[in-house]
Structure formats: structure tokens, C-alpha cells
Amino acid sequence: MPTLALVRHGQSQWNLENRFTGWVDVDLTEKGEAEAKKAGQLLAQTGVGFDQAFASLQTRAIRTLWLALTEMGAVWLPIEKDWRLNERHYGALTGLNKAETAEKHGDEQVKIWRRSYDTPPPPLDLGADIDPAADRRYAALDAAHLPRTESLQTTLERVLPYWNETIRPALAEGKNVVISAHGNSLRALMKHLFGVSDAEIPGYEIPTGNPLLIDLSDDLAVTGARYLDDERAKPLPPTP
């Protein structure tokens, strides 16, 4: 019976500054590095022998994984990186301070953009300095695949094929897997794994640097789940 660990990256600089980050490649803060190291220590204490690691193409997730694997004595693990595990694209909100955006547009509108399941923010302008189309790491992708804005729903629509094509088969082989990604890409995956409704999923928050350990049956149904740092745990959906 395989084990899956989901790790949201440690605190980033824009987390600290309360800004919408999305696809901008922001690095970890000193606190974020400490959270990543602690995540690795907590994973090591479980005694689970991990076999495979996955990460997004964003620095904060990759460095979180590196720091965690170092603490686990498992830097030798094969790592696969893919853009489909990237954070949700926040469109025209990217880089804006969340509190200032709420003052400008109203708390309710910002809440809809941030927490509704299927309502994306306004799209990013073509040719913007932070347009991922200008980022070399995405040069091989068809421009049609690069989002200009996303809701949680459209984030799930890109995460799920990667799950089904790549991660799920590794688990089906009996491998124990750790994924280092982002609040929304992991929340989308949580929705799928736990069967959370569209209405309920916006209420679930994944804390930075706190591994979520998920026990799976042989047919990859969730049989149990827990955050490893009890003091920083958030509520979890019921086990299906």
C-alpha cells in the first residue's frame, strides 16, 4: 500500500509581502527555508521509504524539495519537474498586495477571485513583463497551454492529466511518492483525491512546509491522512 506526501513550499518572499504570486518565480525566505528543512525532518521521522519525487517548475517548490530531501538523507531520489504542478495563475492580480487589492475592489470581489472554485481573476495582459510566454523554461510548450489567468477549476484541469499519466502510475507500482508544489495545485489534487465538492473545496487551506501524509489502498483510494506538524495543521476533508 503506497504512501503519498504532499508538501506546499515553504514561505516565499511574496507570501511574506502578502502579494499574489502565481507563476512569478519568487524564492523562499529564511523562514521558508526553515519550514522546508523541518518538512524533511518530519518526513524522515515517519520511517516511510520514499521512492520518487515530483515538483513544479517554480524555484520555491524545487528548493523546498531539495532542502527536505537533504534532511531526509534522500537527495538521490529521482525527481521529475513539470509545469502542470505550478501554482494557479492569478492573472492581472499577479504581484498586487492582497490587502490593497481588497481596498480597491472590495473584500467580496477579492474573496470570489481568491476562493471561488470556478471564477478566475481578470487575465494578464499580453506582453506583460511577467508573461510566462517570455520565460525560457516554458519555451517548448505550445503557447495555447500557457494560462493568462486560472480558477481552481482550470488549475485542476491541468493537474489531473499529469496525475493520471505520471504520478498515479508510479503509486500503482507501489512506489512511495512526495510532491512539492503549491497551495492551489495541491488543493486541486486534494479535491480529486478526497472527492471534495466544488462548494466545499475553497474552504480548505494547505499550510506552507507542513507535509500532508496520505495513506492509499492498493487501488489508490485514500484510507487515511494527517499533517505531520500538529501545531500548524489545518482541517482535512473526511476520508472518502
Image: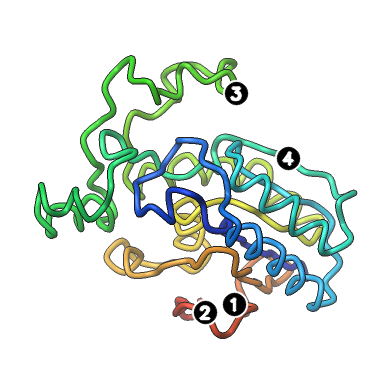
Asked if marks 1 and 2 touch (Cβ < 8 Å), the reply is yes
Q: Upstream in the sequence, badge 4 or badge 1?
A: 4
Q: Upstream in the sequence, badge 3 or badge 2?
A: 3
Residue 84: x %, y % from top left = 54, 38
Question: What is the residue that sits farthest to the front in this orientation?
Answer: 30
Count residues near mark 3 (Cα–Cα under 10 Å), then give few for <14, some for 14-19, many for 20+: few
The residue indicated by pointer 1 is: 227
Q: Nearer the viewer, residue 171 or 219?
A: 171
Count residues near mark 4 (Cα–Cα under 10 Å), then give few for <14, some for 14-19, many for 20+: some
Residue at x-position 19% and y-position 48%: 101
Q: Upstream in the sequence, badge 3 or badge 1?
A: 3
Using the numbered discs, state the Cα–Cα distance from disc 3 to disc 2 in whole angstroms. Answer: 33 Å
Q: Is residue 180 left or right of residue 174?
A: left
Residue 78: x %, y % from top left = 83, 45
Q: Is residue 125 left or right of residue 201?
A: left
Judged from the image, the secondary structure of the residue bearing numbered disc 1 is: strand
Residue 41: x %, y % from top left = 77, 71
Using the numbered discs, state the Cα–Cα distance from disc 4 to disc 1 in whole angstroms. Answer: 24 Å
Residue at x-position 58% and y-position 39%: 58
Using the numbered discs, state the Cα–Cα distance from disc 3 to disc 1 in whole angstroms. Answer: 32 Å
220 over 79 or under it: above or below? below
Q: Amino acid at mark 2?
A: Ala
Q: Quadrant of the N terminus?
A: bottom right
- Identify the image quadrant of residue 201: bottom left
Judged from the image, the secondary structure of the residue bearing numbered disc 4 is: strand
78 over 201 or under it: above or below? above
The residue indicated by pointer 4 is: 80
The residue indicated by pointer 3 is: 137
Count residues near mark 2 (Cα–Cα under 10 Å), then give few for <14, some for 14-19, many for 20+: some
Q: Amino acid at mark 4?
A: Glu
